[in-house]
Image: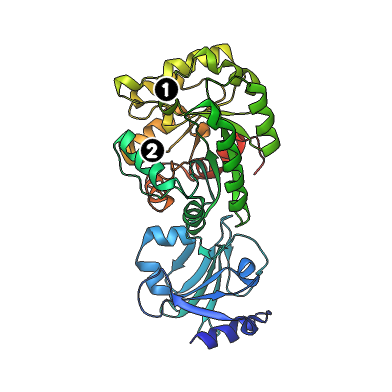
Amino acid sequence: MEVDVLHRLAGVGTAVADYPVTVFESLLCGDFRYCLEYGGDLRAVFGVHFVGRADMLSRNDENMRRRLGIYVAEGEYAVVGIDGRRRDLTRYDFAEDAVHFSFPFGSAAKPRLTDIVVIIIPFQDGFINMNRINYFDVHTHIFPEAIAPAATRNLGRFYDFKVDGNGTSAELGDVSLRNGVSGVLVLCTATSAHQVRKVNEVAAAECAGMRERGLDVECFGSYHQDETDPDGVFEQAERLGLRGFKVHPDIQGVDIDDERLFPLYAYCEGRLPVYLHMGDGRPQYRFSEARRLVRIKEKFPRLRVGAAHLGGYTAWEESYILAGIPDVWFDTSSSVWAIGPERAGEMIHMLGADRCMFGTDYPVKLADTEIPLFERIELTDAEREAIARGNAMRFLGRNG
C-alpha cells in the first residue's frame, strides 16, 4: 500500500518516490492508519501524509475533524485550509504553506466515504501539527539541564502542585512542535541580583538553540530589586536580544510596586514590555495584588505590562479592577486547569478577549493538555485565533 501511495503522489508532479520513506503508526486509530514520513528537506515542504479511511475520519471525533480542518459530507470529500477556503480533489499546490490538502487513494472518481485518502497536515521538525490554529505560547520557563530536576521539584513544592514537564528547552521544543505551537516566549527569573546576568546569558543561549529547531522564540530577561547597576543589566539585555523583562515577586520576595523596581519600569516605559507574575491567595505571598499593578500604571502610564495567570493566580476575584486599564495584557497560564474553561471564558470576556494570550506556564503544564482545555472555552473563532497567537504578536510589537 505504501509504495502505491508514493507512486500516486509522484504522479502529482513531484518525485516523491525517489526519497527515503519510513512508515510508522499514526495518531489516528483504526484500520489502514499509517503515516509516511519523508526524509531530508522534503518533509519541511510536504508535511506528514496520513493515510486513513474517510468514514473513520468523518464519524469518529468531531474535535479531531475540526483540528485537522476536514470537511466530510455524504457523497463528497474535501479539505478546508486554515484560511477557511475549501480545497477540491483536482488541484494541488504543495508549495503553499500551512494549509491542509487531500489526495484520493482509490479510483479516479470522486471517493466514497469508505475510500482511503491521504491528508497532508503541517509538519515541524519531525513533529505532527495536529492543530488548525497556529499557537504562540506566551508564558514558558526553562532551566539548564543540570539544574532542571531540582528547579522543577522546588517549583512544585513552592506552589504545592504537580509540575508536568522536566523544565528543559529540549522538552519545551518537542512539546511545542508536536502541538502546532510555532513560537514561545521564555520568561526568566533570578532569585538574587548577582544571578541576573548569568541567568539572562544562559537563557539567551538556550533560546538560540530552540530557534535552530525552527521555533519562533522570544526571551524576556530577569531583573532583581537589589540590582546596583540597572544600566548594566539593560545594556546586556539589549546585546543579548532580550525583548523585555520578567519579575516574579513571590520568588524574589518583593512587592511589584516596590520603588526598588522603578528603575526597571522607567527604562521599559514606552520601550519594552514587563511581565509580572500576578496573584497568590496565601497571606504571606501578597506581593502582586491587582491593586499594586493599578498603582504601577498610575505612575508609569505608558508601561506595557503582561499580567500573568488572568491577572491573579488563586486570587482571580481581584483581577476585575484591571479590566480596561490601557496596555495591561493577560495570559491563560495556570488558570484554565485551575478554574475550569467556563470560568476562564467569563474572565477572558471580562478582562477583554483582545488583551488575553495563550500560555502554558511550562513546565507546570504542557501544551498537550493546555490546548484541549483552551479549546473548551466558549469563544468565537476570531477570539480564539487572537488569543492563540494574534494578541501575543501585538503585545510583543510584532506584525505576525
Q: Tell me which residue sits at (58%, 75%) in the image.
A: 38
Number of disc labels: 2
Q: Quadrant of residue 345?
A: top left
Residue type at mark 1?
Gly
For disc 1, the neighbor class at 10 Å (few under 14, some 14 to 19, many from 20) is some
Q: Nearer the viewer, residue 315 or 243?
A: 243
| Quarter in which the C terminus is drawn | top right
Secondary structure of residue under mark 1: loop
Q: Is residue 284 left or right of residue 2?
A: left
**Distance of label 1 from label 2 (alpha carbons):** 20 Å
Question: Relative to 327, is 217 above or below?
Answer: below
Q: Which residue is mark 1?
A: 253
Name the spot of residue 252 as percent of width and height, x first: 45, 25
Is residue 271 shown to the viewer in this render?
A: no
Name the spot of residue 90 as percent of width and height, x first: 62, 75
Q: On residue 334, which mark appears?
A: 2
Q: Tell me which residue sits at (48%, 87%) in the image.
A: 1
Secondary structure of residue under mark 2: loop
